[in-house]
Image (cartoon, rainbow, N blue to C red):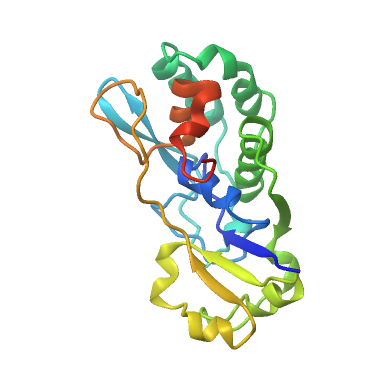
């Protein structure tokens, strides 16, 4: 029986391509037992504002060196209200903001988040399952598999254990993953392609693809899948 697997680090309210990746596999796993990287997508993302693109960042403190993503704690209070305030302010005039307002308001204001990985994973799964209706099975987190070894073959034992026959990888792994190395373990390697996204109606020109999926949700609403690649 064939089984296509996808796996990557959890990001903060990631862009639409992240969800296309999830929707392109049979099972998806979070790869959060790896080194946390600063100034990356783990704890921040871009939203559109009247003055241009703006970063919203989750405060994780400066002591993140040599820490795994799954161990990074959120260090300040008040940021959730601040992030929601900016999102509500900048997107209040988007056509479908009111339709999804309570969904995201609950995420930001009804619970105090303390662990970055737990928060990211929860938000990603809620958007995937409850808004995009993605049927992909969420298989959990790589930390449950006690992975070790070099970068290129660290998760091979995990893929074999969960019955992976095809591994769909993001293009950034082309520097260390090869079809030949995966084939030795009976696994076919495929690459995710993020080219060819259409533009959609977006506030505050010029158009920008690389923003949080919130932008697509609030602007396109029930038609959002037409602006993605894996639903066609």
Query: In the image as oriented, which residue stretches furthest toward the front?
Result: 232
* Residue 31 in view here: no
13 up-or-down from 157: above or below: above
The image shows residue 99 at horizontal and vertical percentages of 58, 14
| Residue 64 location (% of width, % of height) | 50, 58
Residue 92's image quarter?
A: top left
Which of 224 and 93 lies nearest the eye of the viewer?
224
Which residue corresponds to the image point at 44% horizontal and 34% vertical from the top-left? 227
Q: Nearer the viewer, residue 166 or 47?
A: 166
Q: Quadrant of residue 172?
A: bottom left
**Above or below for 108 versus 170:** above
- Is residue 75 or residue 143 the one in the foreground? 143
Whether residue 43 is situated above or below residue 219 in the rendered picture: below
Number of numbered discs overlaid on the protein picture? 0
Q: Which corner quadrant holds the N terminus?
A: bottom right
Q: Position of residue 133 (x, y in %)?
A: 66, 35
Residue at image point 71% right, 52% down: 138
Q: Is residue 38 visible?
A: yes
Outermost residue toward the bottom?
184
Identify the residue at horizontal 51%, vertical 78% (top origin): 151
């Amino acid at each position: 029986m064939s089984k296509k697997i996808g796996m990557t680090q959890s990001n903060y309210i990631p862009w639409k391509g992240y969800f296309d990746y999830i929707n392109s596999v049979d099972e998806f796993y979070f790869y959060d037992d790896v080194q946390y990287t600063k100034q990356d997508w783990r704890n921040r993302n871009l939203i559109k504002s009247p003055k241009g693109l703006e970063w919203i960042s989750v405060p994780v403190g400066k002591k993140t060196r040599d820490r795994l993503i799954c161990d990074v704690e959120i260090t300040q209070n008040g940021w959730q209200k601040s992030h929601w305030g900016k999102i509500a302010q900048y997107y209040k005039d988007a056509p479908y903001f009111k339709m999804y307002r309570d969904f995201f308001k609950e995420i930001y204001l009804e619970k105090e988040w303390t662990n970055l990985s737990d928060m990211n994973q929860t938000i990603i799964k809620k958007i995937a399952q409850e808004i995009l209706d993605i049927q992909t099975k969420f298989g959990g987190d790589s930390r449950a598999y006690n992975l070790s070894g070099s970068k290129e073959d660290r998760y091979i034992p995990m893929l074999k254990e969960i019955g992976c026959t095809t591994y769909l990888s993001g293009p950034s792994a082309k520097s260390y993953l090869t079809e030949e190395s995966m084939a030795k373990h009976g696994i076919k390697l495929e690459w995710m392609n993020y080219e060819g996204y259409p533009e959609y109606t977006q506030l505050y020109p010029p158009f920008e693809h690389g923003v949080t999926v919130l932008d697509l949700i609030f602007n396109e609403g029930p038609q959002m899948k037409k602006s993605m690649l894996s639903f066609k």
